[in-house]
Image (spheres, grey):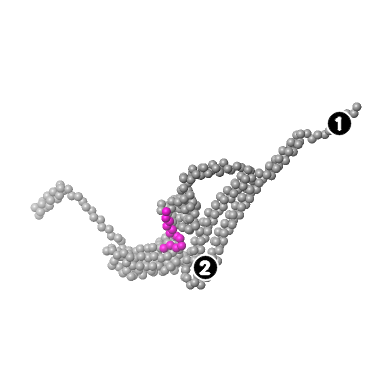
Amino acid sequence: MRMQSPEPTTGPGLDDVADKSGEAFEWLVGAPLQSLVAVVLGAVALAIARWVISRAVRSVVEGGTKVRSHARRLLMRTRIDVGGSDALAIARRVQRAETMGSVLRSAAGLVVGIVVITAIANINDWDLGPVLASAGVVGVALGFGAQTLVKDFLSGLFMLVEDQYGVGDVVDLGEASGTVEAIGLRVTQVRDLSGTLWYVRNGEVLRVGNMTQGWSKAFIEVLVPPGSDVDQATALLRGAVDELAADERLGDLLLEEASVTAYEDLTAEAVTLRLMVKTAPAAQWEVQRELRARIRSGFEAAGVPLALPRREVLVEREVTGSATGTAATSGQDQRSSS
Protein backbone atom coordinates (compact mmCIF):
# COMPACT_ATOMS: atom_id res chain seq x y z
CA MET A 1 0.00 0.00 0.00
CA ARG A 2 1.44 3.36 -1.15
CA MET A 3 1.53 6.28 1.27
CA GLN A 4 0.36 9.71 -0.14
CA SER A 5 2.56 12.72 0.72
CA PRO A 6 0.78 15.75 2.26
CA GLU A 7 0.07 18.65 -0.07
CA PRO A 8 2.07 21.84 0.69
CA THR A 9 -0.01 24.60 2.22
CA THR A 10 0.79 28.23 2.86
CA GLY A 11 -1.13 28.31 6.12
CA PRO A 12 -3.81 30.74 7.18
CA GLY A 13 -1.32 32.92 9.12
CA LEU A 14 0.59 34.04 6.02
CA ASP A 15 -2.58 35.14 4.23
CA ASP A 16 -3.70 37.24 7.19
CA VAL A 17 -0.32 38.92 7.44
CA ALA A 18 -0.37 39.74 3.74
CA ASP A 19 -3.89 41.14 3.97
CA LYS A 20 -3.04 43.25 6.99
CA SER A 21 0.13 44.53 5.34
CA GLY A 22 -1.84 45.54 2.28
CA GLU A 23 -4.45 47.30 4.38
CA ALA A 24 -1.75 49.10 6.36
CA PHE A 25 -0.04 50.21 3.17
CA GLU A 26 -3.33 51.45 1.70
CA TRP A 27 -4.06 53.34 4.96
CA LEU A 28 -0.56 54.81 5.00
CA VAL A 29 -0.74 56.05 1.44
CA GLY A 30 -4.29 57.21 2.09
CA ALA A 31 -5.27 59.65 4.82
CA PRO A 32 -1.87 60.07 6.57
CA LEU A 33 0.02 60.71 3.35
CA GLN A 34 -2.69 63.01 2.06
CA SER A 35 -2.71 64.91 5.36
CA LEU A 36 1.06 65.27 5.19
CA VAL A 37 0.79 66.51 1.60
CA ALA A 38 -1.85 69.04 2.69
CA VAL A 39 0.42 70.35 5.45
CA VAL A 40 3.38 70.59 3.07
CA LEU A 41 1.30 72.34 0.42
CA GLY A 42 -0.01 74.73 3.07
CA ALA A 43 3.54 75.55 4.19
CA VAL A 44 4.61 76.12 0.59
CA ALA A 45 1.57 78.30 -0.09
CA LEU A 46 2.26 80.36 3.04
CA ALA A 47 5.91 80.81 2.06
CA ILE A 48 4.90 81.90 -1.45
CA ALA A 49 2.27 84.31 -0.12
CA ARG A 50 4.72 85.90 2.30
CA TRP A 51 7.35 86.12 -0.42
CA VAL A 52 4.90 87.87 -2.75
CA ILE A 53 3.89 90.31 0.00
CA SER A 54 7.51 91.04 0.90
CA ARG A 55 8.38 91.47 -2.77
CA ALA A 56 5.50 93.91 -3.23
CA VAL A 57 6.60 95.94 -0.21
CA ARG A 58 10.20 95.92 -1.41
CA SER A 59 9.14 97.06 -4.88
CA VAL A 60 7.36 100.03 -3.31
CA VAL A 61 10.41 100.87 -1.22
CA GLU A 62 12.95 100.46 -4.02
CA GLY A 63 10.71 102.00 -6.65
CA GLY A 64 10.46 105.35 -4.87
CA THR A 65 12.94 107.02 -7.19
CA LYS A 66 11.07 105.99 -10.35
CA VAL A 67 7.72 107.01 -8.94
CA ARG A 68 9.13 110.36 -7.82
CA SER A 69 10.69 111.07 -11.23
CA HIS A 70 7.48 110.22 -13.12
CA ALA A 71 5.39 112.25 -10.69
CA ARG A 72 7.72 115.24 -11.00
CA ARG A 73 7.52 115.18 -14.82
CA LEU A 74 3.74 114.98 -14.66
CA LEU A 75 3.49 117.84 -12.19
CA MET A 76 5.89 119.96 -14.24
CA ARG A 77 3.57 119.57 -17.20
CA THR A 78 0.70 120.91 -15.11
CA ARG A 79 2.98 123.67 -13.72
CA ILE A 80 2.32 122.79 -10.11
CA ASP A 81 5.14 123.57 -7.68
CA VAL A 82 5.23 120.94 -4.97
CA GLY A 83 8.72 121.55 -3.60
CA GLY A 84 9.65 118.70 -1.30
CA SER A 85 6.14 117.35 -0.84
CA ASP A 86 6.68 114.57 -3.39
CA ALA A 87 9.65 113.22 -1.42
CA LEU A 88 7.58 113.30 1.75
CA ALA A 89 4.75 111.50 -0.03
CA ILE A 90 7.15 108.78 -1.19
CA ALA A 91 8.49 108.34 2.34
CA ARG A 92 4.97 108.12 3.68
CA ARG A 93 4.03 105.55 1.04
CA VAL A 94 7.03 103.42 2.00
CA GLN A 95 6.07 103.56 5.69
CA ARG A 96 2.48 102.63 4.91
CA ALA A 97 3.57 99.76 2.65
CA GLU A 98 5.72 98.28 5.42
CA THR A 99 2.85 98.49 7.89
CA MET A 100 0.37 96.90 5.50
CA GLY A 101 2.93 94.20 4.63
CA SER A 102 3.22 93.20 8.28
CA VAL A 103 -0.55 92.92 8.63
CA LEU A 104 -0.96 91.02 5.35
CA ARG A 105 1.68 88.48 6.33
CA SER A 106 -0.17 87.77 9.57
CA ALA A 107 -3.49 87.52 7.74
CA ALA A 108 -1.96 85.13 5.17
CA GLY A 109 -0.83 82.79 7.96
CA LEU A 110 -4.32 82.77 9.45
CA VAL A 111 -6.05 82.06 6.13
CA VAL A 112 -3.65 79.27 5.12
CA GLY A 113 -3.97 77.67 8.56
CA ILE A 114 -7.78 77.56 8.30
CA VAL A 115 -7.61 76.06 4.78
CA VAL A 116 -5.13 73.35 5.85
CA ILE A 117 -7.21 72.36 8.87
CA THR A 118 -10.35 72.13 6.71
CA ALA A 119 -8.55 69.98 4.12
CA ILE A 120 -7.23 67.59 6.78
CA ALA A 121 -10.73 67.27 8.23
CA ASN A 122 -12.15 66.33 4.81
CA ILE A 123 -9.36 63.82 4.14
CA ASN A 124 -9.87 62.02 7.43
CA ASP A 125 -13.69 62.18 7.17
CA TRP A 126 -14.03 64.10 10.38
CA ASP A 127 -17.61 65.06 11.11
CA LEU A 128 -17.39 68.77 11.71
CA GLY A 129 -21.15 69.24 11.92
CA PRO A 130 -21.41 68.94 15.70
CA VAL A 131 -18.27 71.03 16.12
CA LEU A 132 -19.62 73.77 13.87
CA ALA A 133 -23.00 73.63 15.59
CA SER A 134 -21.34 73.92 18.99
CA ALA A 135 -19.15 76.71 17.68
CA GLY A 136 -22.26 78.47 16.42
CA VAL A 137 -23.95 78.23 19.79
CA VAL A 138 -20.80 79.34 21.57
CA GLY A 139 -20.37 82.14 19.05
CA VAL A 140 -23.85 83.41 19.73
CA ALA A 141 -23.22 83.20 23.45
CA LEU A 142 -19.90 85.00 23.15
CA GLY A 143 -21.11 87.45 20.53
CA PHE A 144 -22.34 89.91 23.11
CA GLY A 145 -19.03 89.80 24.94
CA ALA A 146 -17.00 90.02 21.73
CA GLN A 147 -18.50 93.31 20.61
CA THR A 148 -15.48 95.24 21.83
CA LEU A 149 -13.16 92.81 20.01
CA VAL A 150 -15.03 93.29 16.74
CA LYS A 151 -14.97 97.03 17.30
CA ASP A 152 -11.21 96.93 17.82
CA PHE A 153 -10.66 94.95 14.61
CA LEU A 154 -12.87 97.20 12.50
CA SER A 155 -11.26 100.34 13.91
CA GLY A 156 -7.79 98.94 13.26
CA LEU A 157 -8.73 98.04 9.70
CA PHE A 158 -10.03 101.54 8.96
CA MET A 159 -6.96 103.12 10.59
CA LEU A 160 -4.73 101.21 8.21
CA VAL A 161 -6.86 101.88 5.14
CA GLU A 162 -7.19 105.61 5.92
CA ASP A 163 -3.48 105.87 6.85
CA GLN A 164 -4.17 107.77 10.06
CA TYR A 165 -0.72 106.92 11.43
CA GLY A 166 2.11 104.50 10.82
CA VAL A 167 5.08 102.96 12.56
CA GLY A 168 7.49 105.70 13.60
CA ASP A 169 4.90 108.49 13.82
CA VAL A 170 4.62 110.63 16.96
CA VAL A 171 0.94 110.65 17.88
CA ASP A 172 -1.41 111.83 20.60
CA LEU A 173 -4.12 109.22 21.24
CA GLY A 174 -5.61 110.94 24.27
CA GLU A 175 -4.49 108.81 27.20
CA ALA A 176 -1.17 107.89 25.55
CA SER A 177 1.24 110.03 23.54
CA GLY A 178 4.53 109.00 21.99
CA THR A 179 6.11 107.12 19.11
CA VAL A 180 4.18 104.32 17.39
CA GLU A 181 6.23 101.12 17.55
CA ALA A 182 3.74 98.56 16.21
CA ILE A 183 0.25 98.55 14.71
CA GLY A 184 -2.09 95.58 14.81
CA LEU A 185 -5.71 95.04 13.98
CA ARG A 186 -6.57 95.02 17.70
CA VAL A 187 -4.01 97.16 19.54
CA THR A 188 -1.47 99.88 18.81
CA GLN A 189 1.81 100.03 20.74
CA VAL A 190 2.97 103.55 21.67
CA ARG A 191 6.23 104.35 23.48
CA ASP A 192 6.14 107.63 25.44
CA LEU A 193 9.05 109.91 26.38
CA SER A 194 9.61 108.16 29.71
CA GLY A 195 10.06 104.80 27.97
CA THR A 196 6.70 103.32 28.95
CA LEU A 197 5.14 101.13 26.27
CA TRP A 198 1.39 101.69 26.04
CA TYR A 199 -0.98 99.14 24.48
CA VAL A 200 -3.95 101.10 23.17
CA ARG A 201 -7.00 99.27 21.88
CA ASN A 202 -7.98 100.56 18.46
CA GLY A 203 -11.64 100.67 19.38
CA GLU A 204 -10.93 103.06 22.26
CA VAL A 205 -9.17 105.65 20.07
CA LEU A 206 -11.65 108.49 19.58
CA ARG A 207 -9.21 110.99 18.07
CA VAL A 208 -5.69 110.89 16.68
CA GLY A 209 -3.24 113.78 16.66
CA ASN A 210 -0.39 112.93 14.28
CA MET A 211 2.58 115.29 14.80
CA THR A 212 4.81 113.83 12.07
CA GLN A 213 2.58 113.07 9.08
CA GLY A 214 3.66 114.80 5.89
CA TRP A 215 5.48 117.70 7.58
CA SER A 216 5.87 119.40 10.94
CA LYS A 217 6.25 122.98 12.13
CA ALA A 218 8.71 124.57 14.54
CA PHE A 219 7.06 127.20 16.77
CA ILE A 220 9.00 129.68 18.94
CA GLU A 221 7.84 132.76 20.86
CA VAL A 222 10.27 135.37 22.20
CA LEU A 223 9.48 138.12 24.74
CA VAL A 224 11.35 141.45 24.57
CA PRO A 225 10.88 144.56 26.75
CA PRO A 226 8.51 147.21 25.35
CA GLY A 227 11.28 149.80 25.30
CA SER A 228 13.60 147.72 23.09
CA ASP A 229 13.93 147.99 19.31
CA VAL A 230 11.31 145.52 18.06
CA ASP A 231 12.45 145.80 14.44
CA GLN A 232 15.99 144.89 15.44
CA ALA A 233 14.74 141.91 17.44
CA THR A 234 12.69 140.74 14.45
CA ALA A 235 15.73 141.03 12.20
CA LEU A 236 17.74 138.96 14.67
CA LEU A 237 15.12 136.20 14.52
CA ARG A 238 15.30 136.16 10.74
CA GLY A 239 19.07 136.06 10.92
CA ALA A 240 18.98 133.01 13.20
CA VAL A 241 16.76 131.19 10.69
CA ASP A 242 19.04 132.14 7.79
CA GLU A 243 22.05 130.77 9.69
CA LEU A 244 20.24 127.54 10.34
CA ALA A 245 19.21 127.23 6.68
CA ALA A 246 22.87 127.56 5.67
CA ASP A 247 23.91 124.78 8.05
CA GLU A 248 25.02 121.62 6.21
CA ARG A 249 23.45 119.23 8.71
CA LEU A 250 20.20 120.97 9.65
CA GLY A 251 19.54 123.09 6.58
CA ASP A 252 17.79 120.27 4.72
CA LEU A 253 15.26 119.95 7.56
CA LEU A 254 13.68 123.30 6.66
CA LEU A 255 11.07 122.96 3.93
CA GLU A 256 9.93 126.58 3.55
CA GLU A 257 10.93 130.10 4.47
CA ALA A 258 10.25 131.05 8.06
CA SER A 259 7.41 133.34 9.09
CA VAL A 260 8.55 135.94 11.66
CA THR A 261 5.93 138.30 13.10
CA ALA A 262 5.97 140.92 15.85
CA TYR A 263 3.41 142.25 18.29
CA GLU A 264 1.63 138.91 18.60
CA ASP A 265 0.91 140.03 22.14
CA LEU A 266 1.52 143.32 23.96
CA THR A 267 1.54 143.89 27.70
CA ALA A 268 3.16 146.39 30.05
CA GLU A 269 6.01 143.94 30.61
CA ALA A 270 6.81 142.50 27.17
CA VAL A 271 6.22 142.39 23.43
CA THR A 272 5.73 138.90 21.94
CA LEU A 273 7.56 137.92 18.74
CA ARG A 274 6.66 134.69 16.95
CA LEU A 275 8.70 132.49 14.61
CA MET A 276 7.22 129.58 12.63
CA VAL A 277 8.89 127.41 10.00
CA LYS A 278 7.83 124.21 8.24
CA THR A 279 10.19 121.29 8.84
CA ALA A 280 10.60 117.67 7.87
CA PRO A 281 8.47 115.18 9.83
CA ALA A 282 9.58 114.75 13.46
CA ALA A 283 12.36 117.34 13.01
CA GLN A 284 10.57 120.28 14.65
CA TRP A 285 11.99 119.61 18.12
CA GLU A 286 15.60 119.55 16.95
CA VAL A 287 15.03 122.69 14.87
CA GLN A 288 13.42 124.49 17.81
CA ARG A 289 16.34 123.69 20.13
CA GLU A 290 18.91 124.88 17.63
CA LEU A 291 16.96 128.07 16.87
CA ARG A 292 16.63 128.93 20.56
CA ALA A 293 20.39 128.58 21.02
CA ARG A 294 21.12 130.79 17.98
CA ILE A 295 18.51 133.37 19.03
CA ARG A 296 19.99 133.64 22.52
CA SER A 297 23.51 134.08 21.15
CA GLY A 298 22.35 136.70 18.62
CA PHE A 299 20.42 138.70 21.21
CA GLU A 300 23.37 138.71 23.62
CA ALA A 301 25.76 139.83 20.88
CA ALA A 302 23.43 142.68 19.83
CA GLY A 303 22.66 143.72 23.40
CA VAL A 304 18.92 143.09 23.11
CA PRO A 305 17.56 141.86 26.46
CA LEU A 306 14.88 139.25 26.86
CA ALA A 307 11.85 140.23 28.91
CA LEU A 308 10.85 138.35 31.98
CA PRO A 309 7.17 138.22 32.91
CA ARG A 310 6.74 140.20 36.12
CA ARG A 311 4.63 138.77 38.88
CA GLU A 312 3.14 140.82 41.70
CA VAL A 313 2.39 138.98 44.93
CA LEU A 314 0.07 140.62 47.45
CA VAL A 315 0.53 139.38 51.03
CA GLU A 316 -2.23 140.20 53.52
CA ARG A 317 -1.57 139.88 57.24
CA GLU A 318 -4.31 139.78 59.81
CA VAL A 319 -3.71 142.24 62.72
CA THR A 320 -5.39 141.34 66.03
CA GLY A 321 -6.80 143.89 68.55
CA SER A 322 -4.07 143.36 71.14
CA ALA A 323 -1.42 143.88 68.55
CA THR A 324 -3.14 147.11 67.43
CA GLY A 325 -3.31 148.41 71.04
CA THR A 326 0.34 147.58 71.61
CA ALA A 327 1.31 149.42 68.44
CA ALA A 328 -0.72 152.51 69.46
CA THR A 329 0.82 152.57 73.00
CA SER A 330 4.32 152.30 71.62
CA GLY A 331 3.51 155.16 69.28
CA GLN A 332 2.36 157.41 72.16
CA ASP A 333 5.46 156.56 74.20
CA GLN A 334 7.62 157.50 71.25
CA ARG A 335 5.82 160.86 70.82
CA SER A 336 6.06 161.64 74.58
CA SER A 337 9.74 160.81 74.65
CA SER A 338 10.39 163.00 71.64
Inspect the image, locate mark 1, and give the three-letter code of the amino acid beneath it: Ser
Inspect the image, locate mark 2, and give the three-letter code of the amino acid beneath it: Ala
The residue nearer to you, when weighing 112 against 313, is: 112
| Residue that extends furthest to the top in the rendered view of this protein | 1
Horizontally, is 4 left or right of 273 in the view?
A: right
Name the image quarter holding the N terminus: top right
Residue at 32% in and 67% down:
263
The residue nearer to you, when weighing 12 against 138, is: 138
Residue that badge 2 annotates: 71
Q: Secondary structure at mark 1?
A: loop
Q: Secondary structure at mark 2?
A: helix
The disc, 1 or 2, on the residue closer to the chain's N-terminal end is 1
The residue nearer to you, when weighing 83 against 158, is: 158
Q: Whole-percent x and y of residue 87?
A: 49, 65
Residue that badge 1 annotates: 5
Q: Which residues are magenta?
A: 206-217
Examine the residues drawn in magenta and state their main secondary structure: loop
Whether residue 208 appears in this view of the structure is yes
Q: CA distance from mark 1 to mark 2?
A: 100 Å
Residue at 53% in and 44% down:
136
Name the image quarter holding the C terminus: bottom left
